[in-house]
Image (cartoon, rainbow, N blue to C red):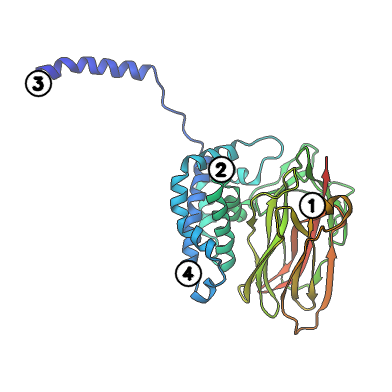
Amino acid sequence: MRALSLLLPVVLAIAACAGSGSSSPPPEPPAVASCMKTIEGACSVASGCLEELPDIALVGVPGPVKDAIRDCPMHVSSQRDLLHEACVRIVQEGGEEVSTIARVLEEIPEDEVLACVDGIECSVETAIGVGTAIADLASNPSDPSGVLEALLGECASRLPPITGADGGTVSPGRDGGTMREQDAGTSATTDAGSRALDAGSTSGGYRLDATEFVLDEHGSTGGTEFSLQCASGEVVRGIVGRAGLRVDAIAPVCARLEPDGTLGSAHVLPSEGGGGGTAFDARCPGDTAVVVGLFGRAGGNLDSVGIACGSISTWVPDGRRGGAPDLGEYGGSIFSGDPYREMCPAGYVVTEIKGRSGSLIDRVGAICTRVVAD
C-alpha cells in the first residue's frame, strides 16, 4: 500500500506531462458521419427490401445482386477505413463544381438525410439499383458515390439552386449530379434540337462538352414528367426496367466516360414507372460501347423499347457504330403503336432518359451530349 502511495505522484506527473504535450483530435465533420451512416443504411434498405418482396418478384433480382446485399454488412465493416477516407474526400471536394451529394451531406441535417434513406420505397427496381451499387462498392470501396447517389436522390431535390461562375444557376439533379439551367439564347423547348449545358468536362482524351441534342419523345401525354440524368461526366451504357404487354418501368445504367474511351463502374438510377411485367437488363457489351439511340413502338403508352449501341472510338469521329448491336425490344407487340427510332447525331451519346410515367411508361425520349477528343 505504501509503495502505491509513493508511486502515485509519479504516475500523476507523467500523465500531466503527457496531457500537456498532446491534444485530442478535432471532431469529425457532421457531413462525414452522415456519409458513413448512409452507406451503412444501404445494407439495411436493400436487405429489408428483399425480405418485403414476394417470392415471385425475387425472381427478377439477379443472384449476384442478392449475394452482394447479403454480404453488405461484412464488406462495410471490413472496408470501413477506406470508406471513411472516401467520405472525407467527397465532403472536402470544393470549387465551382461541388457535387450534389456533397451538398446534401453538408447542407441537410443528418436526421433528414437518414429519413431520405429510410423513406425509399421498396420494389424490385430498388433492390436491383441499390444492390448493384453495393456490388460495385464491394469491388471498389474507395468510390461509394454509386451507393450515395442511389440513396440520396430525393434529398437532392430539397437543395436550393446555387450560382455558377457565369451567373447562371445550378440546380441539383436527382441522381447526385448537377445540371446547369439554360442561359439566355439557348433553346428552352423539349423539341428535337441542341441546347447548351455545363457538362463538367475533364481535360485530355475523350470528354463530354457543353452541347446537348434533345431527341423526340414517343408515346402519350399521360402520367407525370420524369427525367433520369446521369451524373456529370457519365454516359448511359444501358437500360433496365420491367416489361410485359407494354413497358412498365425504365431506368438508365450510368458509367463514367474515362479519357481513354473506356467506361468506369456502372450503376443504376432509381426507376420510373410501375412494378408490373418482368425484369429486363440491357447493357451495351464490352467496356467502350454506349447508348446512342432508342427504338421501339409507341401509341397510347410505350409499347416497347430497345437501345442502339455504338463504340466510342468509331461513333465519336464519324458516326460508325463499330459493330455494336441493337438490344431489345422489350415490351409487347399486340398493340397498334407506331414504330420509332431516334438516334443521336454522330459524336453524341445518350446521357439522360426522359418522358412521362404513371403505373406504366407513357412516353420516352432521351438527351444526347457531345463527346470530343482532345
Image point 43% across, 51% down: which residue?
74
Q: Which residue is mark 3?
A: 1
Callout 3: SS: loop
Residue type at mark 1? Ile
Q: Amino acid at mark 4?
A: Glu
Tell me whether the residue at label 3 lies in contact with that at label 4, contact meaning CB atoms closer than 8 angstroms. no
Residue 333 lies, in percent from the top left, at 75, 81
Q: What label does residue 206 carry, if any?
A: none
Residue visible at 75% across and 47% down in the picture: 261
Q: Which residue is mark 1?
A: 312
The residue at the point 89 percent across, 53 percent down is: 318
148 lies left or right of 72: right
Query: Of helix, strand and loop, which one carries label 2?
Result: loop
Q: In this rendering, which labeled residue sits more in front, label 4 or label 2?
A: 2
* Amino acid type of the residue that numbered disc 2 sits on in the rendered structure: Ser
- Asked if disc 1 and disc 4 are in contact, CB closer than 8 Å, the reply is no
Classify residue 247 by image quadrant. bottom right
Secondary structure of residue under mark 4: helix
- 86 over 357 or under it: above or below: above
Sequence-first tag of 3 and 1: 3
